[in-house]
Image (spheres, grey):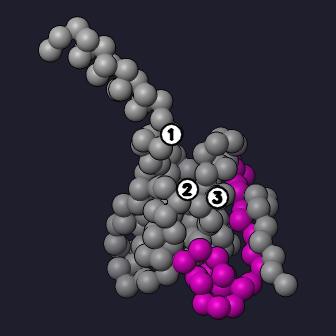
Amino acid sequence: MTPLHRLILAGALASAAASPALAEAPLVEMHKDPNCGCCTAWAEHMEAAGFEVRQHATRDMRAVKIEHGLTPGLASCHTAVVDGYVIEGHVPAADVRRLLDERPDLAGLAVPGMPHGSPGMETGRHDDYAVLGWHHDDRTPSVFAEYTHD
């Protein structure tokens, strides 16, 4: 390889590394019941927003939730982890992005239950819901984002 080719290759590699479009997608490790369709729909929502999602099927979701420090009041159908944060239920991708951008001192985000109209729960009906955050040492949730519909 000539010095000119090396220079061109180095410039191309530097440009690719700096390009957000080519940046590595955040990895979401999602645990779900093997028969849950809304969990798969949430994974598709996350993938459409630029996340890489690895789905792990398990019949013992209770153990997964306990392992990740979730209380029954925060629980939903699936549990995911992205960059050290726990993501419980149908949390919108935009809120996960905001969490990763802002890096608050939170254990994670949760959308308790399975509200209609949340990502993966598009049923034609729209419930109001909140995305809750909680801390490692205090699992009292606080509102991270709210979604209301008329």
Q: Could you tell which of marks 2 and 3 lies nearer the N-terminus? A: 2
Coordinates of residue 41 in the picture (x, y in percent): 47, 77
Coordinates of residue 100 in the picture (x, y in percent): 60, 45
Query: Is residue 136 covered in magenta?
Result: yes
| Depth check, front residue: 20 or 79 | 20
Per the model, the C-alpha gap separating discs 2 and 1 is 24 Å
Coordinates of residue 2 in the picture (x, y in percent): 17, 11
Residue with the mark numbered 2: 86
On screen, residue 77 versus residue 109, left or right, reads left
Report the residue that reaches farthest toward the left. 1
Residue name at image x 43 percent, y 76 percent: 40
Q: Give the range drawn in magenta.
A: 114-138
Query: Is residue 76 covered in magenta?
Result: no
Q: Residue 140: in sight, yes or no?
A: no
Number of the front mark, 2 or 3: 3
Rendered-image quadrant of the C terminus: bottom right
Residue with the mark numbered 3: 94
Per the model, the C-alpha gap separating discs 1 and 3 is 17 Å
Q: Residue 38: in sight, yes or no?
A: yes
Residue with the mark numbered 1: 20
